[in-house]
Image (cartoon, coloured by chain):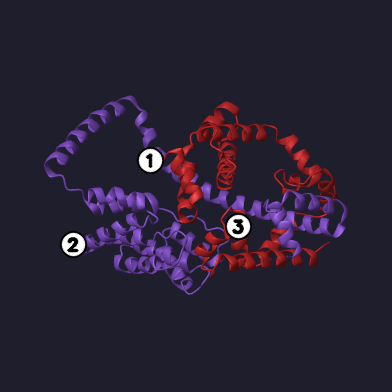
Chain colours: A purple, B red
């Protein structure tokens, strides 16, 4: 066991009580170990700081998104508009109720589009990702989709970032309406050995958006697999299957 | 805005992988109203309240992922408590800065996990050094190394990292991760002032 492993085991709580005590005593007396511990702590503290900065950058973007989503609701605070809104809402409810009673046939395409609008408006900043991947994400968030596609395509050849690049490429094609390409990308993603893999669920979204009968049936089969295998997106898949 | 239950968020965070990213976002949205509350109650700017709120969510994520949140109180009360403390910290900025300046060590540093005698020895060595040079070294260590170390720091297990980054196994991740730490330590030694 190297010194580094020994130090890591101490801070990860993997040492026995006796070994822990011995470590602490040695650390107080042995200058070499104390220096190594100091270096370890400094590195871990720096990583913690870097991680917090990544998360704060992501939350700053989220802050803007939530504010933007809340703004239209604030306008409804004017009394007259509020009153009119209530009438309009009541009329809408009546229409929706009538529609549900007489024409109940949920549009899966709308359901899938709602999901895209709610979840793929922005891509999150990926921790420690390469500058190139960050550039691709930035291009996507600026709605510069051709640049984003070009960057993500290049990165699909990079083993480290391949999964993230393929996923982002599929999402970009989904947004630009190139459903066949999105399906191919998500299909590739679904075959990767990842801890949680949203590939099959995303592929179903692309298939539902494509809209033809065959794709619709295929989406249903995929969603059933997502539920039965408890893959990423299984909760939404279950809810959708009830409506399809 | 669709809100998720405490349990859904907590389980999502513990589940890891891409689900964790989604749950982090849900958690951020869940108590967003605290920002407005902070500006009114503590008379701080929206910017400061939003920053305190981000710190609150980061702290919550860390505690849930590392199984330190035991669920004795509701997530909402817990979040409120942390957020209030962060706002008070902001108001007492001067005191906080004083402590930081005195030791040059972040308040949540691992050094505080050591008992007194060991901490004194290590603290003296750290006090002679400069944290800011580490930021530069993190850039020098390379993208893959940095990603591995950051994922681990974020509470992902070696097995999860293996899945997310396409390393062959958890063992390969662990070896690579320790090698990256060693690389950083070497850089730290070489660049010692």
Return the chain for callout 2. Answer: A
Where residue A213 is drawn, which disc sits there?
Answer: 2
- In this view, the residue in front, A205 or A148, is A205
- In this view, the residue in front, B45 or A183, is A183
Q: How far apart, in angstroms, are the residues tagged by discs 2 and 1? A: 31 Å
Q: Secondary structure at mark 2?
A: helix
Residue B51 against residue A122 in the figure, above or below: above
B102 sits left or right of B2 in the view: right
Disc 1 target residue: B2
Taking the spot 35% from the left edge, 58% from the top edge, the residue there is: A201
Q: How far apart, in angstroms, are the residues tagged by discs 1 and 3? A: 31 Å
Q: Position of residue A103 (x, y in %)?
A: 13, 44
The answer, for residue A45, to whether it is visible in the render is no
| Tag 3 near tag 2, CB within 8 Å | no
Taking the spot 54% from the left edge, 67% from the top edge, the residue there is: B169
Q: Position of residue B22 (x, y in %)?
A: 45, 50
For the residues beneath circles 3 and 2, the answer to whether they share a chain is no
Q: Name the image quarter holding residue B178.
A: bottom right
B152 sits left or right of B113 in the view: left
Taking the spot 28% from the left edge, 50% from the top edge, the residue there is: A240
10 Å neighbourhood of mark 1: few (<14), some, or many (≥20)?
Answer: few
Q: Secondary structure at mark 1?
A: loop
Disc 3 target residue: B152
Q: Name the image quarter holding residue B187.
A: bottom right
Taking the spot 79% from the left edge, 67% from the top edge, the residue there is: B190
Q: Position of residue B17 (x, y in %)?
A: 49, 56
Q: Is label 3 or label 2 in front?
A: 3
For the residues beneath circles 1 and 3, the answer to whether they share a chain is yes
Q: Quadrant of the C terminus of chain B?
A: bottom right
- Counting residues from the N terminus, which is met first, the one under dot 1 or under dot 3? 1
């Amino acid at each position: 066991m190297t010194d580094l492993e020994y130090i890591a085991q101490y801070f990860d709580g993997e040492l026995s009580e006796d070994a822990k005590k011995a470590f602490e005593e040695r650390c107080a007396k042995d200058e070499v170990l104390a220096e190594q511990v100091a270096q370890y702590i400094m590195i871990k503290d720096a990583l913690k700081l870097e991680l917090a900065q990544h998360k704060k950058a992501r939350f700053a973007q989220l802050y803007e998104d939530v504010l933007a989503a809340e703004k239209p609701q604030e306008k409804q605070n004017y009394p007259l508009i509020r009153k009119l809104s209530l009438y309009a809402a009541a009329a809408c409810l009546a229409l929706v109720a009538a529609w549900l009673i007489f024409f109940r046939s949920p549009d899966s395409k709308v359901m899938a589009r709602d999901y895209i609008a709610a979840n793929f408006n922005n891509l999150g900043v990926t921790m420690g990702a390469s500058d190139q991947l960050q550039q691709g994400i930035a291009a996507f968030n600026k709605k510069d989709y051709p640049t984003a596609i070009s960057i993500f395509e290049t990165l699909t050849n990079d083993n480290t970032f391949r999964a993230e690049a393929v996923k982002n490429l599929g999402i970009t094609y989904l947004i630009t309406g190139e459903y066949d390409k999105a399906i191919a990308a998500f299909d590739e993603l679904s075959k990767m050995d990842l801890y949680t893999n949203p590939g099959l669920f995303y592929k179903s979204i692309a298939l539902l958006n494509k809209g033809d009968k065959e794709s619709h049936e295929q989406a249903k089969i995929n969603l059933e697999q997502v539920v039965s295998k408890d893959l990423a997106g299984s909760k939404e898949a279950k809810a959708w299957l009830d409506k399809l | 805005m669709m809100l998720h239950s405490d349990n859904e968020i907590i389980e999502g965070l513990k589940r890891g992988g891409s689900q964790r990213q989604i749950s982090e976002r849900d958690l951020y949205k869940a108590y967003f109203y605290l920002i407005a509350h902070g500006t009114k109650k503590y008379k701080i700017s929206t910017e400061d309240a939003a920053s305190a709120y981000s710190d609150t969510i980061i702290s919550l994520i860390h505690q849930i992922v590392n199984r330190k949140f035991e669920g004795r109180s509701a997530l909402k009360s817990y979040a409120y408590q942390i957020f209030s403390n962060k706002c008070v910290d902001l108001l007492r900025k001067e005191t906080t800065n004083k402590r930081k300046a005195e030791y040059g060590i972040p308040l949540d540093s691992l050094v505080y996990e050591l008992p007194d005698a060991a901490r004194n020895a290590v603290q003296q060595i750290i006090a002679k050094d400069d944290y800011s040079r580490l930021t530069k070294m993190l850039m020098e260590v390379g993208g893959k190394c940095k990603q591995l170390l950051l994922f681990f720091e974020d509470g992902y297990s070696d097995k999860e990292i293996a899945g997310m980054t396409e390393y062959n196994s958890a063992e390969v991740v662990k070896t690579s991760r320790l090698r990256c730490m060693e690389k950083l330590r070497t850089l730290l030694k070489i660049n010692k002032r």
